[in-house]
Image (cartoon, rainbow, N blue to C red):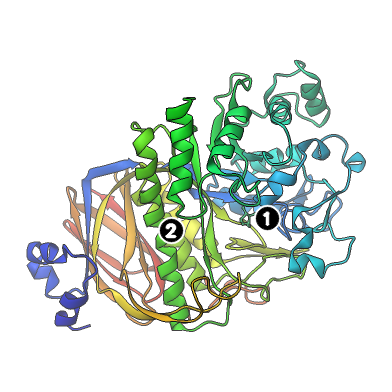
C-alpha cells in the first residue's frame, strides 16, 4: 500500500488528525490505532458474550442433549464436551427455547417424568429441510425430553444464566405467570415448586431474564406495534417476583424498523406509562446463499452487511431515547450472525445447520467489537445459534464434536467481559469493492434483481477495554490479501508487555471438519511494545487479540 493511496482511502475522515499527531509513525505504518485509556465508554456487560439455543434441527437434540443412556460422554444426558467448552469461554447466558419455536411452546409439556411427557408438533415442521425428514424425527415432532429442568441444569453446569423466551402468541399471560412460579417460587410454597422438587430441585431456579415473545412482528404473532405493546403490558403486569429481580426483554424490531421501536416506547412510556423493560431485543442476520462456495466480492458484501449492526444499534438508541430519556432500557441483540442456504449441514436433521468459515469468524468478531464500542447501549448479545445451526460455535453429530473458528473468537474476546470499554480510533485504508447483489437464502433479492453498487468497507475494525492493568485490544482485518502494519498508540498509559493471539487462515473458506478439527485455530503471534506504542502486523483476513499489560 503506497502512502498516497493510504491518504486517499483512509477510512476515517479524521485520519489526517492522527497522521499529524503521529507524523513519525505514519511514515512507516499503514494503519494506526489510538486507544484512549482515559476515555471510558461503559463496563462491558459479560452477557454481551451470550448464546442462543432453540428447539430447531440439531441444536437441542444431537447438540446439547444426547440422553442419559448415550455412548457420548454426558452429564445426566447433556453433552459433556459442550459444557466444558462453554466454561472455557466463560459463557455468561444462554437463551432458550426459541426463536420462533418459543411462541408455539407450552412449557408444561416439558416438565415432570420424561417418559410421560407428550409429543407435539414442532414449529419448524413445515420448513423445507424438515419436510424431507421422516415423521419419527424429533425435529418434526417434539418429544419434550428437554424441558425447563434440563435447560436450567445445562446452564448451571456451564456456569451460565438462563434467559427464557415466553410464548406470547399462543398462550395466555396466566401461563407465563405459572412458568415464573415453576422456576422461582420457594421450596414447598406451591404445587409447581413441588413438581420442580420432584424433578430434583427443591430450591428455586431464580430465572431473571424473560423474553416477552419473540419477533412479535413476524412468527411471534404478526402483531402491530400497538397490539404488541398491549400484550407486553398484559404479560408483565403484576407478575410475582419471588425476590428475584425479573428482567423483561421486549420483542424489538425486524432489523432496522425504527417505527416499531418508536411506537412501542411511545405507547408504554407516553400514552399509558408502565415500567420500561430491562431490554429491547434486536435481531440482525446477514444473508447469503452459499456457506462455502463464495468469491471475494461475496465475502466483502457479507462483511458490509454485517457492519449494519452498528447503525441499527445507534438508530434504536436514538428512537428509544425520545421516550426513555434516561435510557432505562438497553439493547439485547439476541439473534445475529451470517445465515446461508442448506447444503453444508453435518447431518440432514440439522435444519439451518451450516459450516463456519474464517469469513463467519470475521463477522462474529467485528459484531462483538461493535457491542463493546456501544457498551453503554448493549447489555446482552446471543449469537444465533450455539451448536449445529446458523452461526454456531460447535458442530456435533452423535459422538463427533468440533469447535468452529467462532469458538476461538469467543475464547479470545472473553477478556473483554466485565472490563471498561475505552474509546478507540482506527485509521486504515478502506476496501473498495463491487457489491453484486445476488439472491440470498430468502430467494431473489428484494429490491429488483441482481445489480451492483461500488462500496467502501472499513479497513480495520476493533475495540479496546481495560480491567486493572490489563488492556485488551481486539482487531479485525477484513482485507483478503493485505496485511496491515499497524502502530498502536496507548494514550494515557504506557505498556509493560504485550502478547498477541491471531486467528487467521490462508484461505477465507477455511473451516474445521470432523476429519480436520483444528484446520483453523488461534495461535500466538509477534507484537512489540515500546513506551506507549505497540507495533503489530495484522495478517489479512484475521481476528487478533493484543493483551497489553500497562505499567
Ligand atoms: O434463528 C432462527 C430463527 O430466526 C429464529 O427462530 C427466529 O427468531 C429468527 O427469525
Q: Residue 338's spot in the image, x, y percent?
A: 53, 66
The quadrant the N terminus occupies is: bottom left
Which of the pair 192/477 is nearer the observer? 192
Q: Residue 244 appears at what percent x and percent y?
A: 58, 23
Q: Is residue 211 above or below residue 362?
A: above
Residue shown at the point (37%, 50%) measured from the top left = 315
Give x and y (percent) for residue 322: 34, 37
Q: Image check: 126 left or right of 168?
A: right
Q: Identify the residue under disc 1.
A: 81
Q: Which tag, 1 or 2, sits closer to the chain's start?
A: 1
Mark pair 1, 2: CA separation: 26 Å
Q: Nearer the viewer, residue 29 or 177?
A: 177
Q: Is 361 placed left or right of 491 in the picture?
A: right
- Mark 1: secondary structure: helix
Q: Which residue is mark 2?
A: 367
Residue 217: x percent and y percent?
A: 58, 48
Instruction: Identify the residue at image location x=21%, y=74%.
Output: 30
For residue 370, above or below residue 446: above
| Residue 210 relative to residue 534: left or right | right
Mark 2 surroundings within 10 Å by alpha-carbon count, few (fewer than 14), some (14 through 19), many (20 or more) = many
User: Quadrant of residue 532 in the image?
Assistant: bottom left
Ligand 1's quadrant: bottom right
Amino acid at each position: 500500500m503506497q502512502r498516497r493511496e493510504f491518504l486517499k482511502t483512509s477510512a476515517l475522515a479524521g485520519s489526517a488528525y492522527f497522521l499529524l499527531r503521529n507524523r513519525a509513525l505514519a511514515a512507516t505504518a499503514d494503519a494506526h490505532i489510538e486507544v484512549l485509556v482515559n476515555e471510558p465508554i461503559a463496563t462491558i456487560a459479560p452477557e454481551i458474550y451470550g448464546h442462543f439455543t432453540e428447539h430447531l434441527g440439531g441444536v437441542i437434540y444431537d447438540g446439547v442433549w444426547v440422553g442419559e443412556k448415550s455412548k457420548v460422554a454426558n452429564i445426566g444426558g447433556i453433552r459433556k464436551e459442550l459444557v466444558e467448552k462453554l466454561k472455557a469461554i466463560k459463557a455468561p447466558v444462554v437463551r432458550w427455547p426459541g426463536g420462533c419455536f418459543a411462541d408455539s411452546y407450552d412449557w408444561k409439556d416439558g416438565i415432570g417424568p420424561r417418559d410421560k411427557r407428550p409429543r407435539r408438533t414442532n414449529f419448524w415442521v413445515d420448513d423445507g429441510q424438515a419436510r424431507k425428514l421422516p415423521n419419527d424425527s424429533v425435529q418434526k415432532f417434539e418429544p419434550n425430553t428437554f424441558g425447563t429442568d434440563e435447560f436450567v441444569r445445562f446452564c448451571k453446569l456451564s456456569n451460565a444464566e438462563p434467559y427464557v423466551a415466553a410464548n406470547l402468541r399462543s398462550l395466555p399471560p396466566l401461563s407465563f405467570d405459572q412458568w415464573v412460579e415453576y422456576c422461582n417460587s420457594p421450596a414447598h410454597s406451591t404445587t409447581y415448586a413441588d413438581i420442580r422438587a420432584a424433578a430434583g430441585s427443591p430450591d428455586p431456579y431464580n430465572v431473571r431474564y424473560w423474553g416477552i415473545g419473540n419477533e412479535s412482528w413476524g412468527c411471534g404473532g404478526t402483531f402491530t406495534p400497538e397490539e404488541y405493546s398491549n400484550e407486553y403490558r398484559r404479560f408483565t403486569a403484576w407478575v410475582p417476583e419471588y425476590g428475584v429481580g425479573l428482567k423483561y426483554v421486549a420483542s424489538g424490531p425486524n432489523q432496522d424498523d425504527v417505527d416499531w421501536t418508536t411506537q412501542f416506547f411511545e405507547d408504554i412510556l407516553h400514552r399509558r406509562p408502565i415500567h420500561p423493560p430491562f431490554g429491547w431485543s434486536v435481531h440482525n442476520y446477514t444473508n447469503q446463499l452459499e456457506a462455502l462456495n463464495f468469491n471475494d466480492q461475496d465475502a466483502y458484501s457479507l462483511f458490509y452487511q454485517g457492519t449494519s449492526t452498528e447503525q441499527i444499534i445507534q438508530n434504536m438508541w436514538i428512537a428509544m431515547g425520545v421516550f426513555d430519556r434516561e435510557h432505562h432500557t438497553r439493547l439485547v441483540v439476541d439473534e445475529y450472525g451470517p445465515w446461508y442456504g442448506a447444503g453444508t449441514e453435518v447431518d440432514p436433521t440439522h435444519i439451518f445447520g451450516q459450516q463456519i468459515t474464517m469469513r463467519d469468524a470475521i463477522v462474529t468478531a467485528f459484531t462483538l467489537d461493535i457491542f463493546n464500542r456501544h457498551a453503554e447501549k448493549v447489555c446482552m448479545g446471543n449469537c444465533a445459534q450455539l451448536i449445529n445451526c446458523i452461526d454456531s460455535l460447535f458442530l456435533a453429530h452423535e459422538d463427533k464434536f468440533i469447535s468452529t473458528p467462532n469458538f476461538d473468537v469467543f475464547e479470545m474476546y472473553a477478556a473483554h467481559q466485565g472490563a471498561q470499554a475505552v474509546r478507540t480510533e482506527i485509521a486504515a485504508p478502506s476496501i473498495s469493492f463491487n457489491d453484486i447483489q445476488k439472491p440470498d437464502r430468502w430467494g431473489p433479492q428484494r429490491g429488483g434483481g441482481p445489480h451492483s453498487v461500488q462500496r467502501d468497507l472499513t479497513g480495520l475494525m476493533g475495540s479496546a477495554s481495560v480491567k486493572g492493568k490489563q488492556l485488551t485490544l481486539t482487531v479485525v482485518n477484513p482485507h483478503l490479501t493485505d496485511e496491515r502494519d499497524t502502530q498502536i498508540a496507548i494514550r494515557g498509559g504506557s505498556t509493560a508487555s504485550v502478547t498477541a493471539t491471531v486467528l487467521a487462515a490462508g484461505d477465507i473458506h477455511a473451516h474445521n471438519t470432523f476429519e480436520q478439527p483444528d484446520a483453523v485455530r488461534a495461535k500466538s503471534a509477534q507484537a512489540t511494545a515500546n513506551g506507549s506504542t505497540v507495533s503489530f502486523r495484522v495478517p489479512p483476513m484475521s481476528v487478533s487479540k493484543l493483551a497489553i499489560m500497562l505499567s
